[in-house]
Amino acid sequence: MAYAAKLWFLLLLTLFHPWCNSLVDAGTLCQQVPCYFVFGDSLADNGNNNGLKTQAKVNYPPYGVDFKDGPTGRFTNGRNFADIIGELLGLRDFIPPFAASEGRNIMDGVNYASGGCGILPETGRHQGEVISFDQQLINHNRTISRVTAALSGDKKKTADHLNKCIYIAGFGSNDYINNYLMPNLYPNSKIPPDQYAQKLINKYTQQLSTLYNYGARKIAIFGLGPIGCIPQEALSSRPNLLGCVENTNKAVQQFNNRLKPLVDDLNAKHPGAHFTYINVSNFAPVIGVLNKPCCKISEGAGAGQCVPNSAPCPFRSFKPFFDGFHPTETGHILLAGRAYVSASPADAYPYDIRHLASA
Ligand SMILES: *[C@@H]1O[C@H](CO)[C@@H](O)[C@H](O)[C@H]1NC(C)=O
Ligand SMILES: *[C@@H]1O[C@H](CO)[C@@H](O)[C@H](O)[C@H]1NC(C)=O
């Protein structure tokens, strides 16, 4: 019942889009910010890994089966949550992946997200090349140089432009899935969960401060979902009756618990900053019992991703997971909707993205 209610709320939100429908004649008024930048992992990647030597890429069917351009490198059947937040912000086009941004309009924003990557530079490296948050920040610096050039070298205008944009950052899932939970490949697994979470937070603090120093002022930080409840985890460890691996969820909670204090700390130390925390832990009770992937899953190389050209399941709108790790578009709509307009005070702190836009 709760699930149905949330779904309904979000269908209303995405289909109805009241902010824009009431302003059809004034197209630009619907757009709430001039630009939007995305930093993250496979949940937000829109094609940055396609040209990399890596197992962490999915530019093949059945990915994109419900997307207008087919398989683009998005790790789901349709749009991902970063795409949907862009739509809710009123941007008319999807922002380009950094990898394909040469010559494209970068003034509306760029997506740097890379499947498999994390906060720590070594995260996900067993899969091949991935673009870590550190490298995404270096790429952003290159974008800023191009923005400055487009504004005739005017640094003041560049800063004015950049501090009006919305920035989202979603990292940490792979620092667990593709690092901490792989004791044979990564020595971090020996660190106790609370110390590992603190190690991630220390690095994240530094990276988010760099983003601020690059002119970002409106920054939404996404917490981690219940990683112990994803199909791939439940396959490889011992799940409880709800289909979730409790130890994994507890370890991840150590990281999530530190994000609200992180936001307070960043806001206190950086004048004019609006960092906000998006809490996505509330999906746990819903997805645990439904954690069946929607395609045939690879074993070995690219484990947990759909087997290329395998048939996607029917009724995808009612399934939470597309492959062994990633939500369907429906899952992304739920996530994006609650991040944009919080459905309860626990969803966002101190504000949701709609309020961040006007902060
Ligand atoms: C960002 O790029 C500029 C050149 O456009 C360079 O001077 C600066 O050192 C770079 N910053 C970092 C942190 O890499
Ligand atoms: C995040 O949401 C969960 C579930 O609604 C809630 O139990 C938890 O207290 C929230 N966390 C924060 C930091 O608000």
Image (cartoon, rainbow, N blue to C red):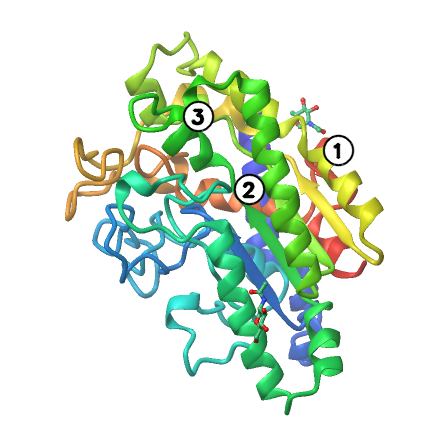
Q: Quadrant of residue 283?
A: top right
Residue 56, position in %: x, y? 29, 46
| Horizontal side of residue 129 vs 208, given as left or right | left
State which quarter of the image contains the C terminus: bottom right
Label 1, label 3: how many angstroms apart (C-alpha)?
23 Å
Answer whether labels 2 and 1 touch (C-beta < 8 Å).
Answer: no
Quadrant in which ligand 1 is drawn: bottom right
Using the rendered image of the protein, determine whether residue 338 is visible from the camera's viewpoint.
no
| Disc marking residue 188 | 3
Residue 189 to residue 297: above or below? above
Three-letter amino acid code at disc 3?
Answer: Asn
Three-letter amino acid code at disc 2?
Answer: Leu
Residue 240, position in %: x, y? 41, 8
Question: Which of pointers 1 and 3 lies earlier in the amino acid sequence?
Answer: 3
Which residue in the protein does label 2 denote?
A: 335
| Disc marking residue 261 | 1
